[in-house]
Amino acid sequence: MSLINRFSSFDLECGTDEAGRGCLAGPVTAAAVILPPSFKNKILNDSKQLSEKKRNFLKPIIEFEAISFAIKHISEIEIDEINILNASIKAMHGAIDELKTIPNYIIIDGNKFKPYKTIPYKTIIKGDSKYLSIAAASILAKTYRDAYMEKIHEEFPMYNWKQNKGYPTKEHRAAIKKYGATKYHRKSFRLLPEQYFLDL
C-alpha cells in the first residue's frame, strides 16, 4: 500500500516521529520533516518495516528532497527528570523549533502530543505507515539516533550498543547485570527485570 503525501490541505505540513522510546540507554530522538506536495517514494515506509540498509539509502533522499527537516535529541538525564512521554514530546517540539521553514500544520505519529504554539495538529496512530512525512521523520529519527548510539558504543563497548542501540535485549541486560549502569543508562527505567535478582 502506498503512503499518502498529505493529511491536511496545507502545503507546509510537517510530519514528526521519535525513536528510542523503549531503550534502556541513550537519548530519545525526534525528527520533523516537511516534504513537498509532489514528493513520491515507493520504498519509504515506517522505519521499523525497513532494513538498516534501506533506511540508510533513504536518509539522503529525504534530506535532499525535503523543504525542511530537523533532528532533536533529549538526553537520558532529561528523560529521567521529566519522564519518557514528556521527553518524546519535547524532542518533537525541539525538532519543529529547528525547522528553517515554519509549518502550518503538524501530523504526529501516535496518540500523544501537546499543542505546539498555535499551529493546528493531528495525532495519527500508526501514522508512520500511512503518511510520507511521518515515515520520513521516523527514518531520520532512527538513523540519527543509531549513529549516536554507535558513537557512544566506542566508550562502553561491553554493552554492544552498536548492535542493540540501547534496546533491552538479553545481551544488553546481561551486560548491565555484569558491569552495572553507565552515565548513558536511564536510571528511571527498570534496567533489569525481577528474575535477574532471584536466587535460582
Image (cartoon, grey):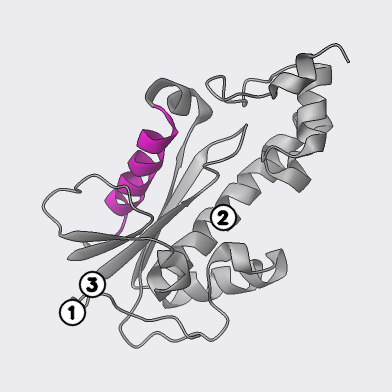
Left or right: residue 186 compared with residue 160: left
Residue 32 drawn above or below residue 197? below
Q: Quadrant of residue 66?
A: bottom left
Circle 3 sits on which residue? Answer: 12
Q: Nearer the viewer, residue 195 or 88?
A: 195
Circle 1 sits on which residue? Answer: 9
Name the residue at the front extreme.
200
The numbered mark at residue 192 is: none
x and y, in percent, of residue 159 in the image? 78, 32
Left or right: residue 62 compared with residue 91: right
The residue positioned 39% from the left and 37% from the top of the image is 85
Magenta stretch, residue numbers: 83-101
Question: Within 10 Å of the Cα at label 3, are there few (<14), some (14-19), or many (20+) other Cα atoms?
Answer: many
x and y, in percent, of residue 198 in the image? 80, 14
Left or right: residue 44 compared with residue 176: left
The residue positioned 58% from the left and 48% from the top of the image is 145
Q: What amino acid is at disc 3?
A: Leu
Name the residue at the top extreme.
199
The residue positioned 44% from the left and 34% from the top of the image is 84
The residue positioned 56% from the left and 40% from the top of the image is 22
CA distance separating discs 1 and 2: 28 Å
Q: What amino acid is at disc 1?
A: Ser
Kind of element beneath mark 3: loop
Q: What amino acid is at disc 2?
A: Lys
x and y, in percent, of residue 123 in the image? 29, 58
Circle 2 sits on which residue? Answer: 142
Name the residue at the right extreme.
200
Mark 2 or mark 3, which is nearer the start of the sequence?
A: 3
